[in-house]
Image (cartoon, rainbow, N blue to C red):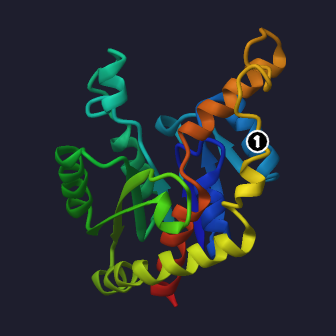
Amino acid sequence: MLSLDLFSCIGCHAIGFERAGIEAAALCEVNEWRRARLKEQFPGTEIYEDVRTVPTTKANIVFGGPPCQRTSVAAAIHGKRDGESLWPYMLKAGLDAGAEWIVVEQPPGNAEWEAAVSRDLCAAGFHVARLEYGACDVGAVYPRRRVYLLACTSLSRLEIAWSAVPSEIESVKRAADARASWCPDILATLPVVAVDAGEMDRGAKSRERRQWIEALGDSNPPEMAEVIGRAIVRAES
């Protein structure tokens, strides 16, 4: 199966899908530094710059977490809530791709926005199920709860995927333990003190670290998308 990965950041969603057996047909990320990281992680894969101008890319699945300045709590705190949403462009990309699955990721707490997205998906011929779980459910040491609107053109396949999610969460958690994804000994070696990590200087090391911190802050661990990918693969098989 092929996915069109939108709002790709540094590719954590695409890595999770790859682990589930789903290949990225193309990625899309507006930030230049993050696109460079995607090129390193996915050599040879097409990477687009703007979701508003993504050319038609055939894919079974479209996956993304569109920024929504209309509902973002962080945007409101920083005085940057402007009412714009990139969701309509994601939906258009999905329809142009001929995708049978569309997965929309968001933080919880945006019930009105979720309802509007679900209505758009239903109007476009999709059935929609809502999932909510956290990074902690797949073994992480932090909560990071997220909502996934899982949409499919087939109600029966959607029911299979939705029903599979609890068991896939457990499977992915075991796989993450086997990979030592959350190994305390490894995490303890990370330079989290700003002075020790070069955060206080003004050189390239400090700028690079800030880029990584911002990108990781915008990313879910790959295990979260892996759950969705495995559930879809189960429904398709």
Kindly identify which residue carries mark 1: 190
Q: How crowded is mark 1: few (under 14 residues within 10 Å), some or many (20 or more)?
A: few
Residue 10 screen position, x and y as percent? 66, 43
> Residue drawn at (40%, 54%), measured in percent from left and top?
145
**Is 3 drawn above or below residue 85 in the view shown?**
below
Front-most of residues 36 and 190: 190
> Residue drawn at (62%, 71%), measured in percent from left and top?
22
Q: Residue furthest bottom?
A: 237
Q: Can residue 71 be seen in this view?
A: yes
Residue type of the residue flagged with mark 1:
Leu
> Residue drawn at (19%, 49%), measured in percent from left and top?
111
Front-most of residues 126 and 206: 206
Viewed as shown, does residue 139 lie left or right of 79? right
Front-most of residues 146 and 174: 174
Residue 93 screen position, x and y as percent? 45, 50
Residue 231 screen position, x and y as percent? 47, 79
* Secondary structure of residue under mark 1: loop
